[in-house]
Image (cartoon, rainbow, N blue to C red):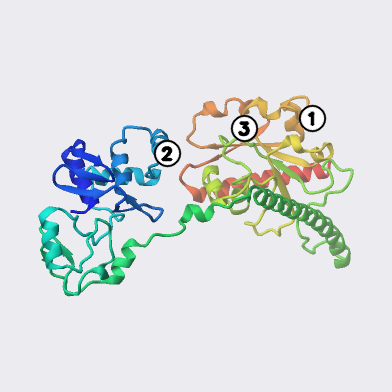
């Protein structure tokens, strides 16, 4: 019986009180005796073998909190069981688990009474110890000695590589590799975030500048096209030429949408609806985009026979508009709540919808109560189906037709 097995056996049987210390050895009743400093067959996660003294002190003080146990062990000069080993070691000693990777092999019997003398007589050159010893310390034809001193036959084949792998322990795990002393990744995160924000800002400004230049260029081309053709029957491309001083401010016209998710059209799905004629719920688009909410979205009329002539900016933050930007606002998708127009540079909703085209999107089978307020406003109600997506195109064309007619009327007023 090796020291570890003896401690486990006595723990399971509830006979730890029979283990007494006599000078420098522990006596297990009248069964066994081992030196106090004997190494047992239990290897800690740190790589060392726990001694018999450590195991017995631990198993007799498991009722203490770990910090109290460490303090008590320190005052008595006994090496302590580490916190990571505490639970698995206790479960093994109490018999809650039958085996453990921490338990080592090749344990030799304890020198004891007649059985030891008999073994010494039969094998005088065999080193007897209660500690773990390498397998090559055994005689060629002997693997171990049982409790009665009789030799046990050595197996025909021993997989030494498997034995080595069983006792291997990693020097570092995933957590220890991630621990970097005196290093802080917060600065890296901040720098990366700033670079991404700057990139988006530059791209947004470039898109705006490009759209303004394109609008002006196409207006000039329209004038040249008519002059060079020389006759009125020549088909001219349909386009809107925004001139400084007109009712619409110079630049790309703006469409406002609510920032609240309870409305059908938001800055997330407006491009799909107006450009492709398909309604996609906002929550679905948020998951698809997997990124920051855009400040501005550009839309164009693409699904008609007419040439694409005008681009529109879609925004959902009226508070960010400058005074000159309000001259470019041509349409708004309303939420149906008065507070949507708080801090707008207009007297009331009557003035708003005299100068800006209003749309209210709803599902066709929603109750009329949802449109009760907007029916009192000068707003066009656009109804779509909850399930028939092929009908979305018709609703989007209705928006475009009314928007283009409104813009033409303002441009020539």
From where the camera sits, is residue 95 visible?
Answer: no
| Sequence order check, earlier mark of 3 and 1 | 3
Q: Residues within 10 Å of mark 2 (few under 14, many from 20)?
A: few
Q: Quadrant of residue 149?
A: bottom left
Q: What residue does disc 1 label?
A: 345
Q: Nearer the viewer, residue 358 or 269?
A: 269
Q: Say if mark 2 contacts mark 1, CB within 8 Å.
A: no
Spatial CA distance of label 2 from label 1 is 77 Å
Spatial CA distance of label 3 from label 1 is 18 Å
| Sequence order check, earlier mark of 2 and 3 | 2
Q: Residues within 10 Å of mark 3 (few under 14, many from 20)?
A: many
Report x, y in % for residue 11: 21, 41
Which residue corresponds to the image point at 86% horizontal and 59% vertical from the top-left?
220
* Disc nearest the viewer among 2 and 3: 2
Against 183, residue 171 (above or below) is: below
Against 144, residue 15 (above or below) is: above
Q: What residue does disc 3 label?
A: 335
Which residue corresponds to the image point at 88% horizontal and 67% vertical from the top-left?
228
Q: Is residue 365 left or right of residue 212?
A: left
* Disc nearest the viewer among 2 and 1: 2
Against 112, residue 386 (above or below) is: above
Q: Say if mark 2 contacts mark 3, CB within 8 Å.
A: no
Report x, y in % for residue 77: 40, 41
Q: Nearer the viewer, residue 4 or 398?
A: 4
From where the camera sits, is residue 46 visible?
Answer: yes
Report x, y in % for residue 247: 84, 40
Q: Say if mark 3 contacts mark 1, CB within 8 Å.
A: no
Residue 271, label in figure: none
Q: What residue does disc 2 label?
A: 74
Q: Nearer the viewer, residue 179 or 160?
A: 160
Q: Is residue 45 left or right of residue 368?
A: left
């Amino acid at each position: 019986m090796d020291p570890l097995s003896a401690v486990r056996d006595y723990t399971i049987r509830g006979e730890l009180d029979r283990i007494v210390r006599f000078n420098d050895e522990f006596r297990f009743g009248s069964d066994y005796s081992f030196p106090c400093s004997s190494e047992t067959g239990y290897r800690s996660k740190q790589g060392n073998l726990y001694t018999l003294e450590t195991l017995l002190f631990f198993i007799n003080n498991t009722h203490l909190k770990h910090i109290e146990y460490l303090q008590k062990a320190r005052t008595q000069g006994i090496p302590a069981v580490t916190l990571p080993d505490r639970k698995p070691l206790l479960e093994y000693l109490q018999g809650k688990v039958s085996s453990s990777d921490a338990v080592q092999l090749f344990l030799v019997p304890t020198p004891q009474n007649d059985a030891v003398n008999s073994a010494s007589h039969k094998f005088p050159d065999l080193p007897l110890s209660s500690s773990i010893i390498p397998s090559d310390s055994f005689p060629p034809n002997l693997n171990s000695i049982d409790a009665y001193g009789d030799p046990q036959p050595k197996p025909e084949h021993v997989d030494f590589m498997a034995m080595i792998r069983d006792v291997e322990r990693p020097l570092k795990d995933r957590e220890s590799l991630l621990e970097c002393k005196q290093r802080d990744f917060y600065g890296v995160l901040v720098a990366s975030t700033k670079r991404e924000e700057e990139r988006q800002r530059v791209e947004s400004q470039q898109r705006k500048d490009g759209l303004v230049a394109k609008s002006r260029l196409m207006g000039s081309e329209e004038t040249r096209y008519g002059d060079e053709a020389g006759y009125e029957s020549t088909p001219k491309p349909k386009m809107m030429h925004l001139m400084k001083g007109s009712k619409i401010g110079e630049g790309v016209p703006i469409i406002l949408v609510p920032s609240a998710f309870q409305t059908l059209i938001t800055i997330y799905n407006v491009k799909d609806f107006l450009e492709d004629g398909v309604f996609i719920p906002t929550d679905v688009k948020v998951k698809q985009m997997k990124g920051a909410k855009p400040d501005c979205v550009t839309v164009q009329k693409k699904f008609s026979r007419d040439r694409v002539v005008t681009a529109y900016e879609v925004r959902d933050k009226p508070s960010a508009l400058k005074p000159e930007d309000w001259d470019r606002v041509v349409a708004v998708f309303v939420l149906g709540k008065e507070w949507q127009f708080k801090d707008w540079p207009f007297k009331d909703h009557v003035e708003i919808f005299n100068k800006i085209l209003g749309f209210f999107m709803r599902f066709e089978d929603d109750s009329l109560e949802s449109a009760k307020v907007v029916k009192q406003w000068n707003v066009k109600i656009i109804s779509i189906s909850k399930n028939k997506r092929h009908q979305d195109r018709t609703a989007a064309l209705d928006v475009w037709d009314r928007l283009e007619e409104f813009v033409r009327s303002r441009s020539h007023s």
